[in-house]
Image (spheres, coloured by chain):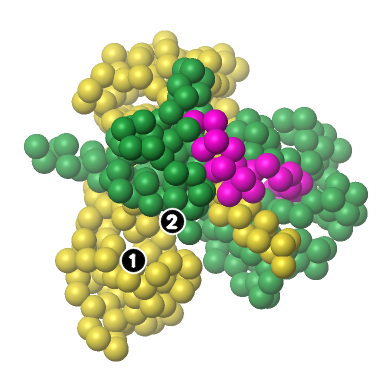
Chain colours: A yellow, B green
């Protein structure tokens, strides 16, 4: 799990190296960029099956392909954004998602002023049309950005409508039946790193 | 670094245990919730200085206090959101931030239709008023949500205006002088975990 979460960061750096025309990249370079230990990076990259050469490093092209394969980012998943508010709209337009096979095909909202309009070119449907919207768009993932009080109820409707994977941006810990995957996103976690660093600096 | 990023997730679970009236929580319970190894959780929690008792676990109240102390979440940081679009607006209203001492005091934008208005009760200033806005609000952190082509230039203006910590939500790798901290946020990293799990399930 922790390895999977670090791989996208590695991929960013390795893709930047490719844009600069580099054919090889060392684990130490990746580690330095992300303030990790080189041994950690090499252990993580071992899951891809790509072996680095001493003094030369990992082959850039093969490593990118292997990470994308490991993360299943070469597969397309159709997703509905549930809640067409600011966060839902921002995620609908997030350019990195499409590159990783995450295809936001529709949004759902209860607000009639939003329905039948578009957010970042994504059509917005009425919450009542959830089942039809999910079926027609072959969505297998829901991105949950509704207000917290509506989170559990909305998750249950999504599961009833056939969704088996929920990316949860609310601060509610969802109760779901076994077989349904939930990934909870916490935007505070990036702030933790900054906060610790700012505190350290102020003490020196 | 990886420990710091995991602590907010632990904190969530320990706070939930407190709400349920529990006085102790075991590392194994935390590990199960987050699909981590118990040894990992115990190693991470060791940084707080709180010692768990065998068979009983960690004292909930002390552990919460120690994690908040370690993450410097008992300190207040004033932040400006740069870019008052959908993501900037969503972050301005994100309820968890204030609980962790992250106080969004103002927003900056180039769009004159947004200036002198509010996004989630946060006043929006013209980009030209950056220096004055940062000084008046005693901001020491900038949350960067401008379009990628404007990211580097805007970061330079922020640094000129005295900002020494940037939370970067754009997909640009910022070049900054030493002494300026940048934390890059990548919303794809949570998707990586879901994507791998969805792929595994489809193969069974």
Mark 2 highlights which residue?
Answer: B2
The chain letter under disc 2 is B
The chain letter under disc 1 is A
For disc 1, the neighbor class at 10 Å (few under 14, some 14 to 19, many from 20) is some
In this view of the protein, which residue sits in the foreground, B4 or A41? B4
In the rendered image, residue B72, in percent from the top left (x then y), is placed at 64, 48
Against B28, is A41 above or below? below
Left or right, B62 with reference to A38: right
Residue A79 quadrant? top left
Q: Are marks 2 and 1 on the same chain?
A: no
Residue, x 67% and y 58% (percent of image)?
Answer: A198
Residue, x 47% and y 17% (percent of image)?
Answer: B20
> Is the C-beta separation of discs 2 and 1 under 8 Å?
yes
- Whether residue B162 appears in magenta in the rendering, the answer is no
Residue, x 69% and y 71% (percent of image)?
Answer: B179
Magenta residues, as a range? B60-88
């Amino acid at each position: 799990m922790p390895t999977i979460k670090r791989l996208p960061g590695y991929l960013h750096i390795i893709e930047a190296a490719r844009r600069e025309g580099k054919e090889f990249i060392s684990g130490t370079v990746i580690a330095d960029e992300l303030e990790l230990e080189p041994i950690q990076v090499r252990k993580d990259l071992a899951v891809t099956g790509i072996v680095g050469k001493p003094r030369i490093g990992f082959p850039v092209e093969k490593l990118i392909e292997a990470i994308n394969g490991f993360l299943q980012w070469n597969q397309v998943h159709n997703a509905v954004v549930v809640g067409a508010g600011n966060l839902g709209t921002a995620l609908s337009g997030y350019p990195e998602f499409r590159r990783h096979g995450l295809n936001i095909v529709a949004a759902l909202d209860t607000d009639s002023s939003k329905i039948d309009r578009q957010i970042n070119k994504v059509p917005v449907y009425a919450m009542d049309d959830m089942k039809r919207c999910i079926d027609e768009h072959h969505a297998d993932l829901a991105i949950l950005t509704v207000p917290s009080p509506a989170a559990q109820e909305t998750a249950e409707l999504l599961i009833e409508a056939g969704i088996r994977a929920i990316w949860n941006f609310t601060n509610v810990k969802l109760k779901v039946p076994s077989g349904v995957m939930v990934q909870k996103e916490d935007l505070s976690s990036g702030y933790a790193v900054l906060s610790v660093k700012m505190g350290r600096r102020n003490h020196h």
